[in-house]
Amino acid sequence: MAKNLLIVESPAKTKTLARFLGKDFDIMATIGHIMDLPKSKLGVDPDNDFTVDYTTIKGKEKVLTDLKKACKKADKIFLAPDPDREGEAIAWHVASAIKNPKADIVRVTFNEITKSAVNDAINNPRDINMNLVNAQQARRVLDRIVGYKVSPFLWKTVARNLSAGRVQSVALRLICEREAEVLAFKPQEYWQVTAELETKKKDKFIARLVKIKDKTLAAPGDKGKTKTYIKSEADVKKHLTAIKKEDFVVSEIKESQKTKKPTAPFITSTLQQEAAKKYGFTAKVTMSIAQQLYEGIEIGKEGQIGLITYMRTDSTRISNEAIGTVRDYITNEYGEEYLPNKPIQYGKKKSSQDAHEAIRPTYMDHSPEKLKKKLTPRQLKIYTLIWNRFVASQMNPAKYKVISVNIDAGDYLFRVSSQKIIFDGFLKVYNVEKEEDESNGNGDSYENLPKLSEKDLLNLLKLNKQQSFTKPPARFSEAMLVKELEAEGIGRPSTYASIISTLKDRKYVELEERRLHPTELGTTVNKILVENFPNIFNVTFTAEMEKDLDLIEEGTDDWIDVMKEFYSPFMETIDSLKGKEKAIKESMEEKTDQKCEKCGSHMVIKWGRNGRFLACSAYPECKSTKPLPEEEARSKTDQKCEKCGSDMVIKSGRFGRFMACSGYPECKNTKPVTMGIKCPKDDCEGEIVEKQTKGRRLFYGCSKYPKCDFASWDTPVKSACPACKHPYMVIKVTKAKGEFYRCPECKHEVTEKPKEEKANA
């Protein structure tokens, strides 16, 4: 019997696929890309139609060797990496590398890992789509050229080892521009007024002042001739005095019914946004969990099965088969009143590639409730989100009874409203989370207002005034940034998570209270890039380039022509900056009033590989340097020198950080940096300190070594585990999760930065 070989991207899928396909198939995994551009050189020849020099990725040699051996024994080879541009490129690289002329090599894709979807793909193979390959190749070459040409410019103008990414730098620009708006914002004062009122039957409620002399009250800055606001406390007191003289009369009661429609099933961006708002998950964490659910989870007798469809998609489209199963589920679970007469269709965005379905469960008989014990807490959260959103997307709208009551008080109009659900509809299953700045706090609303009639005279119990200030635009959360990137056409579903994680890994941005703040380094890099490459690192250019990549995928544009159109003006910009790096670097220096302790010249602030520092302006004649005052303050510790009693400070040397006496050079006492954490070994009186291997790799060990042999590669953080109260946690970093914190005792994990920072860091 002919032997078939199926090659997938992730080894996590192999067990599920083997159960579907049986003994006639061998299944192997590439474990991601096997070929890429070389790290040591550009790897692209712009003078020869952008010929690309692909090499085997370091560490993938054995994978490729094993694939080649297996391919020699196969009669038919099915290439089944993920169904997107990256997957198509992996399939192409594998086909190019194995070079087996005897075997029939075909491409297969499936949007969900179910038996029917997989068998359908096997029965309907196709050729590798070179339009998809070329679109991915164009993106990779673009990113490589920009990175390799612009990064050295940053090295010469800011500091060594910095890097510039074509798309990430535009995301950084958005964050920096929002930060500039926040810092430049000047709050404006305004006042709001509410009235505590009482009916003849002694029922009490609160109404808000909404108009003064037919002008609507609004926050300062709201445009319109018919709008006004109360500017000061003096003004509000005058209004309160006038209002107290008036009678409060119900002038109008409006009753209406409104509906709230369900939202579309998840696409990549909306899943990332909702998981961030509801659970505080980073985009990277969300995609990692979704990947696990897609590739397959062991659920018992059925073995390992894929629980959701492909999680990198920009389409809200749902297959007819899936719509049929979810409509049956809604009828059986909630009743016919919750089921629309016809399936709900959601509109397609202009920028949508529509290559895959929306993210949805693959089986409607595997509800989150049934899988509680089979999924990790995080997997259950993401699966429940996807399940509920999908089910709700095909349910009837919610219905509300709305009552709005206007109350006249002379020239002043007060308003109170009532909103009551009369049919919960899709809300029975799902409601969209909102960020703090997305919430609408206008007006006072009651579910059950007192019985009111027009011309009712009300008794004023009390007037309340509240001072408010206009707020600056909100800094981006990860969810908000993904939403902005999608709206601007920057990046694609597969890139949102990597864009944000790259910015954090490069220390260009920091996450504080779930908001992205540009670091000083990020602000400086953005300033350099925007000033010197205004036509490259901007929203419009990047969005247009995404459209060009889409046209390459569609076969409308040739990828080499797109590259040529980009390359010439780009290199003109690069060439125009040659020789200007020194002047640009010097223009970034900041003069200070401090004098050099050695020669008396002024000190200036410069950038180096370890950040900003003070240097003598007479360099190179005088090479005196010192930390900035704020850095110096951060370097102070609460420890005293054992030899002279002076304060110990943290310094950096060729072998890393160390603690030194501030009385240097009179006292030259030094010792390792302590983390302020007691050694966890029983009966040890030492504490954890920073150390380095002979190869200068940082690790953490006990100060009582060699008496105590405690050692750890993980950075300890002086913050107790919230689960087991272990005295410290450690920082972990993985490709899938990014940076997170784990308890070394009970393995509990948290994504938020612990409140108490490690000592002396």
Image (spheres, grey):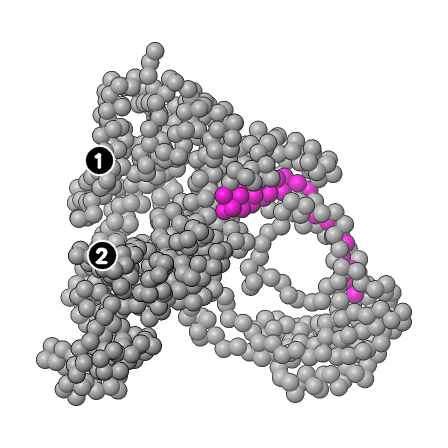
Q: Is 346 placed left or right of 706 in the picture?
A: right
The amino acid type of the residue labelled 1 equals: Glu
Q: Is 681 placed left or right of 377 in the picture?
A: left
Asked whether residue 77 is drawn in magenta, I would say: no
Q: Position of residue 383 (x, y in %)?
A: 53, 42
Q: Is 211 placed left or right of 551 in the picture?
A: right
Disc 2 residue crowd, few under 14, some 14–19, many 20+, Cα 10 Å: few
Observer-nearest of 127 and 514: 514
Quarter of image, res 173 = bottom left
Disc 1 residue crowd, few under 14, some 14–19, many 20+, Cα 10 Å: few
Give the mark nearest the N terminus, 2 or 1: 1
The amino acid type of the residue labelled 2 equals: Arg
Observer-nearest of 496 and 174: 496
Q: Position of residue 465 (x, y in %)?
A: 69, 79
**Can residue 206 be seen by looking at this rendering?**
yes
Residue appearing at x 27%, y 56% in the figure: 709
**Can residue 213 be seen by looking at this rendering?**
no
In the picture, the disc for residue 61 is 1
Q: Residue furthest front?
A: 683
The residue stretch that appears in magenta: 376-405
Q: Residue furthest left?
A: 621
Q: Position of residue 148 (x, y in %)?
A: 22, 53
Residue appearing at x 89%, y 69% in the figure: 201
**Could you give the CA–CA distance between mark 2 and mark 1, rounded to whole angstroms?**
26 Å
Q: What SS does tag 1 mark?
A: helix
In the picture, the disc for residue 697 is 2
